[in-house]
Image (spheres, helix red, strand yellow):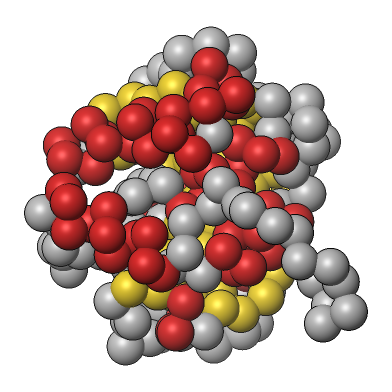
Amino acid sequence: MSSTDPDPGPTALLGPADIRDLAARLGVRPTKQRGQNFVIDANTVRRIVRTAEVRPDDVVVEVGPGLGSLTLALLEAADRVTAVEIDDVLAAALPATVAARLPERADRFALVHTDALHLTDLPGPAPTALVANLPYNVAVPVLLHMLARFPTIERTLVMVQSEVADRLAAPPGSKVYGVPSVKAAWYAHVKRAGAIGRNVFWPAPNVDSGLVSLIRRAEPLATTASRDEVFAVVDAAFAQRRKTLRAALSGWAGSAPAAEAALTAAGISPQARGESLTVEDFAAIAEHAPTP
């Protein structure tokens, strides 16, 4: 919204005073243990929804809704929102917040009180989008679990620690290219989608944040290897990232000569290192795994 736009008038979204009042009523203090930093700026959640390109027919899943800042903005834009919250107090309070601030949309909201890493299914229609301010300490495992478990998620926009955003979106050859980069690329086309300052959070974190956009591949990666087989190669290659692939994959293959044979068969130099390979390269290596 530019400075010339008219004031939108009353909003259902939470502002800084609303967040602090709600937290005080609930006796909630954000905890480092769960990587909690609550967004207190309504313009930021509007920006996230806009960047995520949430559509009126979307079924959005949100992980770690906290006090509901982003939840309310998503509900205004999507057909349905399902929030996944592990915290007992926050999970109990969120439906009431939605009912009080967006009563006309309350029947479009569902809450699942569980650890997202253990989530196996969701109520209602299958999700089409994942939009979340992910708890920083579990951001990558949660993201990869959600992409694996819910193949109907076509579009994802997550807010994560800036360096994690860099790693997820890093191309081969980058200094920060690694396991998260390759595993995210297995599922989706990944890119950085913006930066978020520290002052929009309570408490303000001591790190910057970034937005990451993931658009699921229209077709799965063309390979005869399974995801688990490919990911085993990725894990082995980066466990000793300073070593050549011939050495790094020796444990995976059973010996250095066996690793060299698999690499050569896949058209990969045994002297290459993991950070130079694409996800397609890792899949090719997995296809030529030594037979036990």
Give residue 171's position: percent from left, percent from top.
68, 74
Q: Is 135 left or right of 72, judged from the image as shown?
A: left
Q: Is 233 left or right of 7, judged from the image as shown?
A: left
Q: Is 242 left or right of 132, judged from the image as shown?
A: left
**Residue drawn at (57%, 64%) of the image:** 42
Q: Is residue 151 above or below residue 46?
A: above
**Residue drawn at (54%, 34%) of the image:** 102
Q: Quadrant of residue 130?
A: top right
Camera-nearest residue between 18 and 195: 18
Q: Quadrant of residue 121?
A: top left
Q: Is residue 178 visible?
A: no
Give residue 249's position: percent from left, percent from top.
40, 62
Q: Is residue 90 above or below residue 157?
A: above
Q: Is residue 88 visible?
A: yes
Give residue 22's position: percent from left, percent from top.
27, 53
Camera-nearest residue between 77 and 125: 77
Query: Which part of the image, by quadrant, shows the C terminus?
Result: top left
Camera-nearest residue between 4 and 242: 4
Q: Is residue 270 above or below residue 285?
A: below
**Residue drawn at (44%, 22%) of the image:** 110
**Residue drawn at (75%, 59%) of the image:** 8
